[in-house]
Image (cartoon, helix red, strand yellow):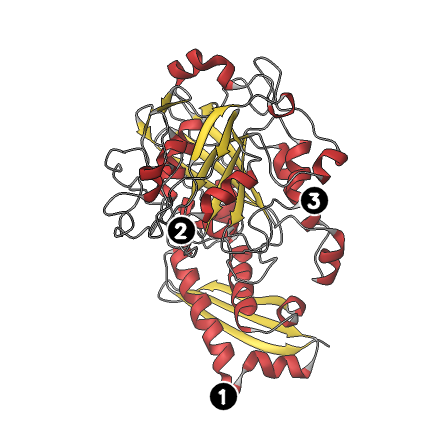
Amino acid sequence: PARLTGSRWNGSSSALCGIPSIPSRCSGNSSALGRILSVPSRWNGSSSALGSLLGIPAEAPPAALGQHPPPVATDKEEQKRLLEHRPDQPAQPRVLRIAIIGAPNAGKSTLCNQLLGRKVFPVSKKVHTTRCKARGVVTHEDTQLIILDTPGLTNPLKAKRHNLDEAMLTDPWDSMKHADLVLVLVDVSDHWTRNSLSKEVLRCLSQFPHIPSVLVLNKVDVLKKKFLLLEIATDLTEGIVNGRKLEVKSSPKQDSRSSVKLPLHPTHASPPESKVPGSPFGQEKNQAQEGSGLDKSSDAGGAGTGEGPEHHGAKDLKDMKGWPHFQEIFMLAALRGEEVDTLKRYLLMQAKPGPWEFHSDVLTSQSPQEICDNIIREKLLEYLPLEVPYGVTQVTHVWEEGECGELLIVQSLLVPRESHKRMLIGRGGRVISRIAQEAGQDLMNAFLCEVCLKLKVEVKG
């Protein structure tokens, strides 16, 4: 399939990735988006990130980053030493702290794993797989990205229903306090929620309006009707991206073969309530020189002009479906890794001068036991029905190196009822065997060593 790839962005790839998996037969060999939309080739002082979405011709995509992420240490003390050890520093270090927020099951952990290049965060189709905030570390040349993977934003009622800790409610907010940039992830395959941000997400953004935010539309490969992406993007941004208003107008002639039905025209945002104080579009000359999609003056501390998007009250949020202060939009398929490198390059570009927080051999702030527990719990969520996996307690009895250098792990899974035990074991032990096999394989990929995992199922005393 043909893809819309990013334009060049100040010497790097475009911030806005293309739409994966648009068949080449749509509108001949060119995108229907590019055919019906007329957008200036210059946007925000550099090659258009949004223009990539809208079909502006792009250069060939750059080569892959070629990252070889380090394995996670299997010894708890070794991992602790790495975390406490004074980080190695390049001559001119750069750093960016990124918070990823969104509704439960939007694909936050999947995106984190793809950015890291190794699976260290649990992934499941069920909600609330991630139970606490954890940090992933990407070290590339002189730049370090610190990725804050957070639980999905939820409310106290839902937290009680799923037997969730109080940290599930507070961790996303705590992560925002330490972030330089926030990625808001939306699952576009969910037709019930894709056209509006949840009230929890809007409240979180409203509480930290000075932190630059970027909209990331995930699972676009699942969306068959690609023209819906324009409608979704418009709804989620309130029709405004980086201070510019996006006007959707009816097309006089619509091609039934086209994957897009509506043309989109960017104009300067004129309504006072939509105008962002200190918007980079009031400083296009400076932006052209800097070539960045983010307002350089609006960092996490509000340095520079000291201005940023206005604070929205509870009454304003009640009537809002989207957030009008997003700096950029990305569209990708995290599970397949499509266009993740484009987002990664953008994040590397946004890093600011500053000391590294982690040693270059650190991939995650989690202990090896935490990674093991999370991976096993991922499989429990995958293979057990309804609320059953949320009541399982994990107890590790053995964690040691074997004679041949393999990692030996023995863990008990405690369930509240005998019926749950039968479900977990499965007929002929098939379910528990499959869980152990798949979890062991994931642990081998994380630790880069042989793993012998043995699981026992018991009823809680």
Q: Residue furthest bottom?
A: 428
Horizontally, residue 78 falls left or right of residue 56, namely right
Q: Position of residue 251 (x, y in %)?
A: 42, 39
Quadrant where the C terminus is found in the figure:
bottom right
In the displayed image of the protein, which residue is found farthest to the front? Answer: 252
Q: Is residue 112 or residue 23 the one in the foreground?
A: 23
Query: According to the image, label 1 marks what residue?
Result: 428
Q: Residue at x 46, y 42 (%)?
A: 230
Residue 300 location (% of width, % of height): 58, 25
Query: Mark 1 is on which residue type?
Result: Gly
The residue beneath circle 2 is: 118
Q: CA distance from mark 2 to mark 3?
A: 27 Å
State the residue at coordinates (34%, 48%). 255
- Disc 3 crowd rating (10 Å Cα; few below 14, some 14-19, many 20+) is some
Q: Amino acid at mark 2?
A: Arg
Mark nearest the camera among 2 and 3 is: 3
